Image (spheres, grey):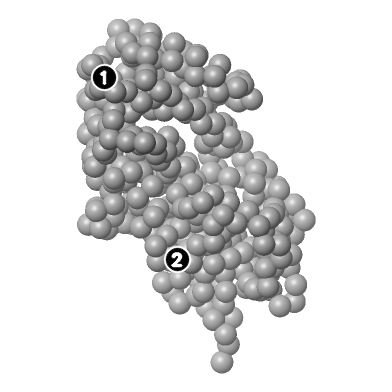
């Protein structure tokens, strides 16, 4: 009787969690690794004393039937909810409210909640920064910065990390996949979290901004299930973020607070900046995922499937289906 195939999955964002969940449900043994302290990737929430703020993905939509069904399961589990903010648009003309029929979902009570829900059923090793892959007769071996070469041999290694990180890992063992990852151009994003002692008197909860350095602002406290003091999130646009990616946080905060003030926002009691070096892909690739059964290596992520949370989840599911078709024959 053949032993149960072991699969290593690197990256515990929503793509990796989607893939790992599906592979494990099919009866394979999955080890999930992430360099951060927990799961979620860019579905991320910063917490302080009596405040919290989602500083990565701000919301997600659900259009494909499979993902809509998944989001319904998250809602039933109490880890996601609809968010219907008062939405405005600033585009250089007079600002105006924006009617929208789009259903926007958020994690509850924080954007990390769906990821934590999925990760609770998986074997997550974190923090574990995987720095090297080595293929041997007995299978794949992985090297982590924290633990060195792990003794376990894996039938497959699946990468659910930003494209530049995947390219670096695959340069030696799989140059073709490294080239695919290298063809994706990922852009950075500065995020600024603002804390206020009292509710901010503005007539909107979120706004798309098409002027100056900002692209999005949101009253995090307007999202369902949030507690603590009022907090707002400012996201800089990709072009401005790329031009100022290596700037210090104080100068970034000064520029974004000035832009927020021009939209009517007051000075915060406190601010915290975060630099996302790999926030989105322009343009996102359309491969869906990549799987090389002859060597047992695969890739998934939003950068392979149109971007966004839904694209990430579906990319992970696509890769899982291909892996299971291959390993079921082993």
- The residue lying at 60 percent from left, 56 percent from top is 128
* Mark 1 neighbour class, 10 Å CA radius: few under 14, some 14 to 19, many 20 or more: some
Reading the image, the residue beneath label 1 is 200
Kindly indicate whether the residue at mark 1 contacts the one at mark 2 (C-beta within 8 angstroms). no
Q: Nearer the viewer, residue 151 or 263?
A: 151
- The residue lying at 60 percent from left, 25 percent from top is 245
Residue 58 in view, yes or no:
no
* Mark 2 neighbour class, 10 Å CA radius: few under 14, some 14 to 19, many 20 or more: some
Say left or right for 256 vs 195.
Answer: right
In the rendered image of this protein, does residue 188 appear above or below residue 239? below
Q: Secondary structure at mark 2?
A: loop
Q: Which residue appears farthest toward the front when viewing the image?
A: 49
- Marks 2/1: CA distance? 40 Å
The quarter of the picture where the C terminus appears is bottom right
Q: Which residue appears farthest toward the right when viewing the image?
A: 172
Image coordinates for residue 115, horizontal then vertical, percent: 40, 53
Reading the image, the residue beneath label 2 is 122
In the rendered image of this protein, does residue 231 appear above or below residue 227? above
Say left or right for 123 vs 107.
Answer: right
Image coordinates for residue 95, horizontal then vertical, percent: 29, 11
Image coordinates for residue 277, horizontal then vertical, percent: 58, 34
Q: Which mark is residue 252?
A: none
Image coordinates for residue 234, horizontal then vertical, percent: 41, 24
Q: Can you tell which quarter of the image residue 25 is in?
A: bottom left
The quarter of the picture where the N terminus appears is bottom right
N-terminal of the pair, mark 2 or mark 1, is: 2
In the rendered image of this protein, does residue 44 appear above or below residue 202? below
């Amino acid at each position: 009787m053949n032993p149960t195939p072991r699969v290593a999955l690197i990256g515990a964002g929503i793509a990796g969690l989607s893939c790992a969940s599906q592979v494990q449900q099919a009866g394979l043994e999955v080890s999930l690794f992430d360099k951060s302290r927990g799961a979620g990737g860019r579905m991320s929430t910063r917490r302080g004393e009596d405040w919290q703020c989602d500083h990565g993905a701000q919301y997600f939509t659900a259009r494909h039937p499979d993902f809509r069904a998944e989001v319904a399961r998250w809602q039933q589990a109490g880890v996601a909810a609809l968010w219907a903010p008062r939405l405005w648009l600033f585009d250089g003309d007079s600002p105006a409210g924006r009617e929208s029929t789009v259903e926007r979902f958020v994690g509850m009570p924080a954007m990390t909640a769906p990821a934590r829900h999925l990760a609770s059923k998986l074997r997550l090793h974190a923090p574990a920064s995987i720095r090297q892959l080595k293929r041997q007769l007995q299978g794949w071996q992985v090297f982590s910065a924290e633990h060195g070469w792990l003794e376990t041999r894996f039938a497959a290694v699946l990468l659910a990390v930003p494209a530049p990180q995947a390219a670096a890992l695959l340069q030696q063992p799989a140059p073709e996949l490294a080239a695919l990852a290298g063809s994706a151009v990922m852009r950075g994003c500065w995020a600024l979290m603002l804390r206020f002692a009292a509710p901010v008197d503005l007539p909107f909860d979120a706004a798309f901004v098409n002027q100056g350095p900002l692209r999005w602002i949101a009253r995090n406290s307007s999202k369902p299930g949030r507690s603590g003091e009022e907090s707002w999130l400012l996201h800089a646009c990709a072009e401005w973020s790329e031009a100022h990616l290596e700037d210090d946080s104080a100068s970034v905060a000064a520029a974004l607070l000035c832009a927020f003030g021009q939209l009517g926002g007051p000075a915060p009691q406190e601010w915290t900046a975060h630099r996302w070096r790999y926030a989105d892909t322009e343009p996102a690739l359309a491969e869906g995922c990549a799987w090389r059964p002859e060597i047992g290596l695969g890739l998934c992520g939003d950068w392979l499937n149109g971007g966004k949370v839904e694209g990430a989840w579906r990319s992970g599911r696509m890769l899982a289906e291909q892996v299971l078709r291959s390993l079921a024959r082993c």
